[in-house]
Image: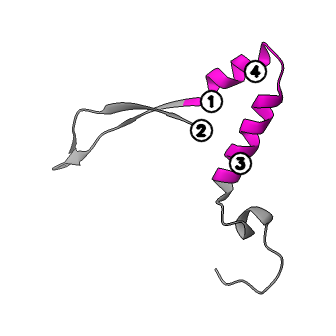
Amino acid sequence: MASSGGAVPFWRAAGMTYVRYSNICASLVRQCLKEPYRSESLSREKVHFSVSKWVDGKPEKPVVREDSAE
């Protein structure tokens, strides 16, 4: 994607991706919440997903992982 020298978003000028910028903003909003909303939002912050490798067209046993939006 070629830039025409116009204005770029500040998160891009700072060398961030939009996802990273969005995660920082969401984290700041969560920290500003009062209880019980803060603890509820922090519990939803974690993401669970599974990863499985495919060998010869068949999936192997999936590995469940937990990640937090940092």
How many other residues sit within 10 Å of disc 2, few (<14), some (14-19) or many (≥20)?
Answer: some
Q: Which residue is mark 2?
A: 69
Nearest the eye: 60 or 46: 46
Helix, strand or loop at label 4? It is helix
| Residue 18 vertical position relative to residue 60 in the rendered view, above or below | below
Q: Which residue is mark 3?
A: 22
Image check: 59 left or right of 45? left
- Mark number for residue 21? none
Q: Quadrant of the C terminus?
A: top right
Image check: 56 left or right of 25? left
The way the protein has been coloured in the rendering is: one colour
Measured from the top left, where is residue 30 in percent x and y? Answer: 76, 30
The answer for how far apart the CA atoms under marks 1 and 2 are is 6 Å
Nearest the eye: 57 or 2: 2
Would you say the residues marked 1 and 2 are in contact, meaning their CB atoms lie under 8 Å apart? yes
Helix, strand or loop at label 2? It is loop
Q: Earlier in the sequence, mark 3 or mark 1?
A: 3
Would you say the residues marked 4 and 2 are in contact, meaning their CB atoms lie under 8 Å apart? no
- Residue 6 falls within the magenta-colored stretch: no
Q: Which residue is mark 1?
A: 45
Q: Which residue is mark 4?
A: 38
Q: Quadrant of the N terminus?
A: bottom right
| Amino acid type for the residue under numbered disc 1 | Glu
| Residue 14 vertical position relative to residue 60 in the rendered view, above or below | below
| Amino acid type for the residue under numbered disc 2 | Ala
Q: Which residues are magenta?
A: 20-46
The answer for how far apart the CA atoms under marks 4 and 2 are is 15 Å
